Amino acid sequence: MSRPYQEIRPSQFVITLGPGSILETGSGPVVLKTVDALFNEIGRNPQDFEIVDERLSRLELNGARIARVPTNAELGLPSDRTIYPTHAFPFWSLCTQHRPHQVLYAADGGCPECPSVSSQQRREKAGREAIRFVQACENGHLDEVHWHGLVHEGGGCGTKHYLWHGGGRALRLVRIECPRCHATANFGQAYAKSWRCSGRIVEHGGRPAPTTARCVQKARIVQRGAANLRLSLLQSALTILDMPTRLHGILSDRSLMGAVGALHPLGLLDQVALMAGAERAGLPPDAIEYLKQTPWSEISKAVDQLLGIGNTASSSLRDDELDRLGQAATCGVPAVPHPHPGSPPLFEVRQDDVRLVQGTDHRQRLRVAPVSRLRMVMVQTGYQRLDPQKAEKVSTAFDWNGTTWYPGIELFGEGVFIDLADDSLTLGGSRANQWNERFRSDPHGDLSLHPAHVWWHTLSHRLLRALSVDSGYSSAAIRERVYLSVRDGRATGSGLLLYTVQPGGDGTLGGLIALVNRFEHVLSHALRDVDSCSNDPLCQEAPSVGADGVACYSCLLASETSCEHRNQGLDRLLLAENLP
């Protein structure tokens, strides 16, 4: 007998699922409600499960806070106790126990051609037989297929179920018939059409009131298990701090940092103001005494790091990370312990382990720095439906007592940072010129279209495959983070972080950083036969028929768990024309 619930990991919730996603359970498909419904359900405050990352909150989340999804173990509940609120979706089901037709019925009424059963048995049967089709639009709305309108074209005769004829290899073979008035519709034709959208945000509950303005976007019928039905939008930040653990733990207090964040932009923050803020925040006497004994220069530097303004040349969180990783590769960073005892260190780079590796064509020298400890905070800021290029973003933020929160996860692991040891990256050739034209013509200035970004991104995917051979990790377990700073259309800094992380524990076991000592072999393997692909000439000629770059699953494309750009902005020939 299958379990009526479904176990999910907190990292799985943030990275893959989240509010508005359809989860398959033993009792049928359900939709996850908004995150505030979880905390109302368990009667806890999200502050009890807060992940503190001031730089990410301030620079990318407009000051919103981050809360992780608690587990049953943390709450002291049995593992089979359901804690996350959901509701059954879709509402219609298909009974396949009849011949020569099947029966499409509303779940509350049950199948009219089956024997009468109790309401509980009727609900269980409807969950097992839930129809696999739903309706969605690019504005993020999700709803049932409007079966009445599909068959009766806007009218209706009051029937509560339909007869489902045919099936098998193609939807065009399916015919849906009304048993009362015998109106029919071809489901294959309906599947290909556009439909009026109801404007329903399914995680909020039922459909909007009829007086509410309807969505103007056309909806499509899709399968509920389609990969593009819900695409998570993630924002992440690497924790790179070089301050005493005790100081980090004190300054991470939310009340204190609220006062610091208000005073710092006005130039009113000094040691006197900080001490007054610490007392108002109710910090313990030993913490206040520690702040009194710490030199103001050290406190000021730590505040800048926590607020993400330590480097005035950095215009974004990503630029700041690139600067800090470059400094760490140059000078090294000793292990920064976590402020909470028992948690893994936040960051560590051993300078003696940093290596310079000559490129295969001796045009560039790569600096390879093993990051033996790192902490990554990932936040799900929203999701899209159907088309990631055009779809609107639906936020996953929730309000709690006037404060905005996002669901997030804290991950620990290891990585390898790679940048250029010499001058900046200079690219040439026909593919570089084409990407440069695309970048200049893009109205949004998308950095993923810059030829330098495409070069690093393509090198990243080749290295992902090569590292997975010897590291002990699958290519799907290794993630990428491509860095590029651009001013006036010219790349001023760039690099690449390949890392692997997991929630809690001790992170990983060193299989990735152990390969730094033999990185020449990894690089050689990654760039071998980069100018050819088993799908050539189709792969090589893809841009001539409208593709962005020369890339396919045989030569470049990676798992969605690895690529933060959904396999866009890749070009094998650009890398082949500019081998390092």
Image (cartoon, rainbow, N blue to C red):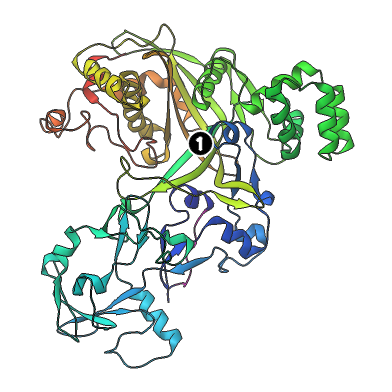
Q: Residue at x 53, y 34 (%)?
A: 60
Q: Assign the C terminus to one quadrant of the image.
A: top left
Q: Which residue is drawn at 79% across and 18% down?
A: 296
Q: Which amino acid does label 1 sit on?
A: Ser
Q: Assign the N terminus to one quadrant of the image.
A: bottom left
Segment tinted magenta in the rendering: 3-9
Compared across the picture, whether 179 is left or right of 31 comes to left
Residue 72: quarter of image: bottom right
Along the line of sight, which residue is nearer the eye, 180 or 176?
Answer: 180
Read off the residue under disc 1: 236
Rendered view: 493 above or below 250: above
Kindly state the secondary structure of the residue where label 1 is placed: strand
Residue 55: quarter of image: top right
Along the line of sight, which residue is nearer the eye, 34 or 441?
Answer: 441
| Residue 530 visible in the shown view | no
Q: Which residue is drawn at 34% across and 62% down?
A: 198
